[in-house]
Each structure stands twice: as structure tokens, then as C-alpha cells.
Amino acid sequence: GKRWDIGDAMSTLKADTIQSTGGGAVTLTKQHAAKAFLRFNQATPATLASFGVSSTTDVGSNESDANFTTAFTSVNFIANGNSHSTTATSSARYIISPPPQSSTVCTIYNYTTSGGADCIFMASFNGDLA
């Protein structure tokens, strides 16, 4: 058969599944994508979009728990995000996640410059999955 040389044109690669030579999942090296994300409306409450989050619990005013589909290997994962008002108010909003106490759930608090308030928040979670 023909040997491909550097610079030769290639056609489109289409695949449903890519596996390692051993038949398992492909290992990505030196890449760190978010393992989960969540967009949640605390006021209604309703999950607007998510990946890797099995459910969200409305714990109380301005406090929600994101429950992960797959646990992280430890509590040393990173949660980051932002939020915005569900109304037209313009006070600054802060999303706060205390140091995680569990590898399966992350508590998210939302505050404005005048105190706690329900909002729409977006968060992503990075770390190694179990």
C-alpha cells in the first residue's frame, strides 16, 4: 500500500469511539479539562446545564450542593465559577466554595455586596476522578 509522507493530505476522520490499543479508554497526557460543570438557578431552583453533576440540592437561601456523578480521588479538587443576578439589580456577586469536605459533593455559596442572595451561578470543577 501507499506510504503517507509528511505534508500529504488526509481525509476526515470519523469515529464513534476511540480506544487505547488495549481496548480501554484513551489516556490524555498533559491535558486537564474540567471534570464537571454546572449552571444552576438558585431562585427557581433549576439546573440549566450540567456535565458530571448527578443532581443539585438547594440547601437554603444562597447555598447549593453540587453532587458529582463520579467522585474525585480526594477533596483536593478545585471549584471555580461566577454568578449573576436573576433580576435587574446590579450589585456585585461572588461565588464562594469553602474547602471541599467530600470528594462527591461541593457546597456553593453566593453573596452580593449586601449579603447572601439567590442567583444563577456557573461553576466548573477540576481534579482527578476516582
Image (spheres, helix red, strand yellow):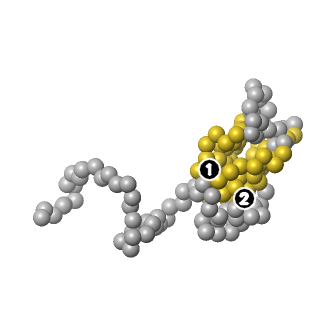
Kind of residue at badge 1: Phe
> Percent position (x, y) of residue 33?
54, 57
SS for dot 2: strand
The residue indicated by pointer 2 is 105
Total marks drawn?
2
Seen at 13% across and 62% down, the residue is 2
Image position, residue 126 (x, y; %): 62, 58
In the image, what residue occupies the spot 70% across and 55% down? 67
Q: Residue at x 38, y 74 (%)?
A: 22
Give the quadrant of the C terminus. bottom right
The x, y position of residue 51, in whole percent, is 59, 50
Q: CA distance from mark 1 to mark 2?
A: 12 Å
Q: Residue at x 75, y 36 (%)?
A: 44
Q: Position of residue 86 (x, y in %)?
A: 74, 32
Q: Nearer the viewer, residue 26 or 84?
A: 26
Q: Residue furthest left?
A: 1
Using the image as rendered, state which of residue 48 and residue 85 is in the foreground: 48
Is 4 placed left or right of 103 in the picture?
left
Q: Secondary structure at mark 1?
A: strand
Residue reaching furthest right?
A: 114
Of the numbered discs in the image, which one, if any, rests on residue 126? none
Residue, disc 1: 37
